[in-house]
Image: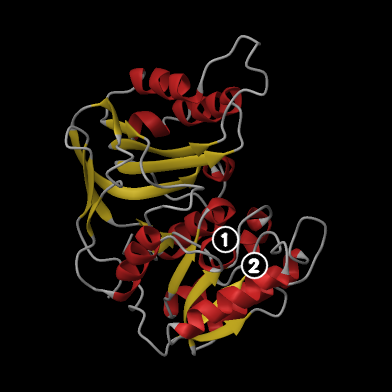
């Protein structure tokens, strides 16, 4: 596969905002996200259906996909930012215009449910995408400065991204020491697992898997990791990076249980690659932006994940 990097983002460029999964909880999040980007000097275009409501979805599958495709085909749009995640992105994967995106590559940003779109885009086009903050979750209100600085540097500089490092007060934990090269792939564990066995999952051999999740009990984390293990994905990975597993606790602490940390440790014991946990990535205000599709080096002993190239050209 030929890896494609999107052009870097410059002040004055157009940024398209879409909601391919759920709608924002209120329009203020859309408006303040737009204001934030415009204040930085970008031209913002809103998808027609970002405020639509169809149950827990931001409109019908056809309308949400139409917004994605409209931004892909709009020559004034240099980057596509998702407003939020939620539920529903896998439903629109067959409707996305991957051919147009491959011909006119552009930055795509999101995380959580957007994982499905990012995996599909990489499988179909080879385009590098960015698992990072969204306008209706982080950018609209009290954007964390650590998150903000790393995010914009990743999208606006064609220099090598370099070491992705946790904040000093929240260190990485070593599960298995060692060094490994590989391609960064992963995202939200629930969406990653649900993409297995579909034509939208990229080849994963020799990848550095970066995984996170939220609001999943340990037995569900266990079930998903078992699927990845039984499917050979964990055994064929170069390295395993567990990000933040936010609120992934048993519903009833008085019942017999394993913790999410114990589950992670047990699956690392089944494989041989280097592995770390508590990486600064996931459903947290203070997060690193992960460029899916780039080559990286994990040095578990040094607790560093070093991205060996730029994310944009």
Extreme right residue here?
Answer: 55
Disc 2 and disc 1: Cα gap in Å?
A: 12 Å
Q: Nearer the viewer, residue 1 or 242?
A: 242
Q: Position of residue 141 (x, y in %)?
A: 55, 66
Q: Position of residue 143 (x, y in %)?
A: 47, 64
Location of the C terminus (image quadrant): bottom left
Left-right relation of 300 to 116: left
The relative height of residue 285 versus residue 221 in the rendered view (above or below) is below
* Residue at 42%, 30% in the rendered image: 232
Marking on residue 19: 2
Q: Which colour scheme appears in the figure? A: secondary structure
Q: Nearer the viewer, residue 117 or 285?
A: 285
Left-right relation of 9 to 101: left
Residue at mark 1: 137
Q: Position of residue 138 (x, y in %)?
A: 52, 61
- Sort mark 1 into few (<14), some (14-19) or many (20+) by Cα contacts within 10 Å: many
Left-right relation of 185 to 258: left
Q: Nearer the viewer, residue 13 or 66?
A: 13
Q: Earlier in the sequence, mark 2 or mark 1?
A: 2
- Sort mark 2 into few (<14), some (14-19) or many (20+) by Cα contacts within 10 Å: many
Count of numbered tags? 2
Q: Position of residue 43 (x, y in %)?
A: 50, 88
* Residue at 43%, 82% in the rendered image: 40
SS of the residue under disc 2: loop
Residues at discs 2 and 1 in contact (Cβ within 8 Å) = no
* Residue at 47%, 30% in the rendered image: 231
Marking on residue 12: none
Location of the N terminus (image quadrant): bottom left
Is residue 157 at all visible to an observer of this figure? yes
Is residue 4 at all visible to an observer of this figure? no
The relative height of residue 127 versus residue 207 in the rendered view (above or below) is below
Q: Nearer the viewer, residue 95 or 243?
A: 243
């Amino acid at each position: 596969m030929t890896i494609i990097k999107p052009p870097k983002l410059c002040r004055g460029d157009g940024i398209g905002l879409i909601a391919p999964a759920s709608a924002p909880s209120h329009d203020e999040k859309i408006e303040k996200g737009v204001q934030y980007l415009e204040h930085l000097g970008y031209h913002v275009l809103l998808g027609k259906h970002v405020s639509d409501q169809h149950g827990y979805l931001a409109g019908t599958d056809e309308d949400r996909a139409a917004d994605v495709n409209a931004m892909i085909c709009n020559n004034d749009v240099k980057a596509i930012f998702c407003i939020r995640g939620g539920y529903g992105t896998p439903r629109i994967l067959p409707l996305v215009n991957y051919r147009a995106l491959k011909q006119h590559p552009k930055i795509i940003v999101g995380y959580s449910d957007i994982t499905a779109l990012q995996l599909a885009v990489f499988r179909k086009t080879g385009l590098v995408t960015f698992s990072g903050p969204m306008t209706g979750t982080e950018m609209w209100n009290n954007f964390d400065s650590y998150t903000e600085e790393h995010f914009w540097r990743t999208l606006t500089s064609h220099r090598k991204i370099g070491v992705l490092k946790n904040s000093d007060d929240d260190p990485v934990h070593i599960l298995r020491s060692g060094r490994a090269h590989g391609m960064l792939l992963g995202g939200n564990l629930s969406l990653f697992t649900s993409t297995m066995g579909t034509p939208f999952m990229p080849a994963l051999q020799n990848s550095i898997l970066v995984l996170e999740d939220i609001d999943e009990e340990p037995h569900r984390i266990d079930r998903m990791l078992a699927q990845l293990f039984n499917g050979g994905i964990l055994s064929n990975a170069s390295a395993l990076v567990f990000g933040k597993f936010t609120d992934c606790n048993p519903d009833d602490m008085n019942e017999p249980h394993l913790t999410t940390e114990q589950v992670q440790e047990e699956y690392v014991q089944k494989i041989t690659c280097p592995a770390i946990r508590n990486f600064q990535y996931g459903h947290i205000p203070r997060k690193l932006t992960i460029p899916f599709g780039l080559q990286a080096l994990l040095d578990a002993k040094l607790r560093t994940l070093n991205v060996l190239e730029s994310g944009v050209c």
